[in-house]
Every structure is written in C-alpha cells, then in structure tokens.
Image: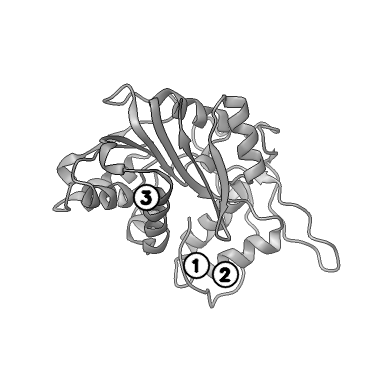
Amino acid sequence: MPSAGKSPRGSVPPICLDEFPFSGTGEAPSPGVLGSTTDRACPGPARGHTPRAVERITEPQLMDDLAQAAAYAGADFDEPHRQFVEELSSRINDLTVLTRVVDLGCGPGHIPLNLLARHPAMRIDAIDGAEAMIQQATALAKGRPGADRLRLIHGVLPGASLPEPQYDLVLSSSLLHHFRDPSDFWADVKRLAAPGGHVFMVDLRRPPSRGDVSALVDRYSEEETELLRRDFYRSLCASFTPQEVRAQLVAAGLSLSVQSLGDRHLVVWGRLR
C-alpha cells in the first residue's frame, strides 16, 4: 500500500494477525514457502537490543470490504502509479505492439486506465478477486479515455478464467505479497504469458527490521487514514525480499530479472522464451 509524504502521527503500533482474520478458510499460513512465514504477532524491536530480521507475516489475499476498497480508490497513489508506468516503459521496448494485456490484481483500476490513455492500440483485461474493488474500478472507468478497451473481471487467482488464453504482456502491481504461497502467483504468470510475451511486476520489498517498517509507514503515509496506514504496515511485513523472489522464479522455471526499486519496492521483468 504505497503512498507519499511524511506522517505527523508517529509510528504505527505493532499489528497482530488476530485483528485481521484470513479470508477463505481462516487457517493460518504454512511456514517456509520460499520466504519464511509466521502467524505470530508483529512486535517491534526491544530497547537495547539489535533489531531482528522481519519474518514474513501473511495478510488476507482479498480486499473485499467496501470501506477498504473505497479508501484505496480515493487514496493518493499518483506517485507510485506514475513510477509503475515509467518503469514499465523503460524496461519493456515498444509497448505499442503489445496489444493483449492482462493486469493481475487490478484493484480500483488506476494503472490499466493510465496505460489505456497512453496507448490507443492496447486492450487490457483487468482481474481482481475482490468484488468491491471491481465495483470501484467500474465507477472510476466511466468517461475515462480508453475505458472501452478495458474489460474488468471478478475472479480469484490462481486459476481464474480469463477472456484470452494468453497475453502479450502480464502486469501486476502489489499483488504477489497477498499470496500465502507465491508459487501460485508465478504459475498463473507462466500460464497467461504467451510464448515470447513480456512480464512486468512491481511489489513492496520487505524491510530488514521492524524499525524500518515503521519508518517507511511514517515517511509515506502522511494524511492517510488509519486503515491505509495499518494496511501499509501489514503489507510490508507480508512482502518478499529480492533474494526470495529470485528463488521463487528459479523454482517456477521463469528466467526473469529482479531488482530493488527505491526504498520500498522491487521490480520483476523480462520476456518468456
């Protein structure tokens, strides 16, 4: 949940998973899925002790609460959305010929609508597992340039049915960290990317310590609601390191590049051969 600015409200308190029950079965995640996972609370470092590394703490895969979806639709994510489009354009050549595009975990639809306004030949199928997010995206798309080339799909990944069997470009922004098992995400990327197709994904990067998590929330959540601040904290704890993502790609048989991006993101990109 990236945003911009400096918070005047101090550090977000530690988040306990009991406050945020899992969707679906409600079962706690299994440990050790190429990036350690725990269902314990998320304590800050004790005074006088060296901060320990942040263990991965999963969060709910779906954001199907109406208030939560509305908060994301109305939040100021202009800077990370702009950065996503700029990084995509700099790392993948000639987007004008990539006409069949899928956006996995589209949320309220800001990124696909931004791309459609820039690329008149592009058609995007945008899928999200949260019906509330699709409702927000539908409302946002009304009257926007390129909205007639956008198909919004309510479907839960992995394995959701899409209008096309494969795509020239598979996009994703801040979705990977929602998966308890990241291999499910990469299996869908592999399934949906056409031979010779491109992949581009940006996600949060797990910081090395609890203090770093809180500092990032303070730095980038100015004027945001407590709901968004808590979601940002939780998402940072749920995200992966570049090393973990590289191991995931090896296990999935995907030859893609991974790089840190700024102080809180990582980017994955490449072309399938």
For marks 3 and 2, give the one nearer the viewer. 3
Residue at the spot 55% in from the left edge and 47% down from the top edge:
20
Alpha carbon distance from label 1 to label 3: 27 Å
The residue carrying pointer 1 sits among few (fewer than 14), some (14 to 19) or many (20 or more) residues within 10 Å by Cα, namely many
Q: Which mark is residue 221?
A: 1
Residue at the spot 65% in from the left edge and 55% down from the top edge:
207
Residue hosting label 3 = 89
Alpha carbon distance from label 1 to label 2: 6 Å
Q: Is residue 246 left or right of residue 139?
A: right
Say what secondary structure mark 3 lies in. Answer: helix
Residue hosting label 2 = 218
- Is 169 drawn above or below residue 205 in the view shown? above
The residue carrying pointer 2 sits among few (fewer than 14), some (14 to 19) or many (20 or more) residues within 10 Å by Cα, namely many
- Amino acid type indicated by mark 2: Asp
Of mark 3 and mark 2, the one earlier in the sequence is: 3
Of mark 1 and mark 3, the one earlier in the sequence is: 3
Do labels 3 and 2 touch, CB within 8 Å? no
How far across and how far down the image is residue 187, in percent? 50, 25
How far across and how far down the image is residue 237, in percent? 62, 50
Do labels 1 and 3 touch, CB within 8 Å? no
Q: Which mark is residue 54?
A: none
The residue carrying pointer 3 sits among few (fewer than 14), some (14 to 19) or many (20 or more) residues within 10 Å by Cα, namely few
- Amino acid type indicated by mark 1: Ser
- Is 42 drawn above or below residue 212 in the view shown? above
Q: Residue furthest right?
A: 48
How far across and how far down the image is residue 34, in percent? 67, 34
Q: Is residue 226 left or right of residue 167?
A: right
Instruction: Find residue 37 and report its image quarter.
Output: top right
Q: Is residue 37 left or right of residue 228?
A: right
How far across and how far down the image is residue 46, in percent? 80, 63
Looking at the image, which is closer to me, 123 or 240? Answer: 123
Do labels 1 and 2 touch, CB within 8 Å? yes
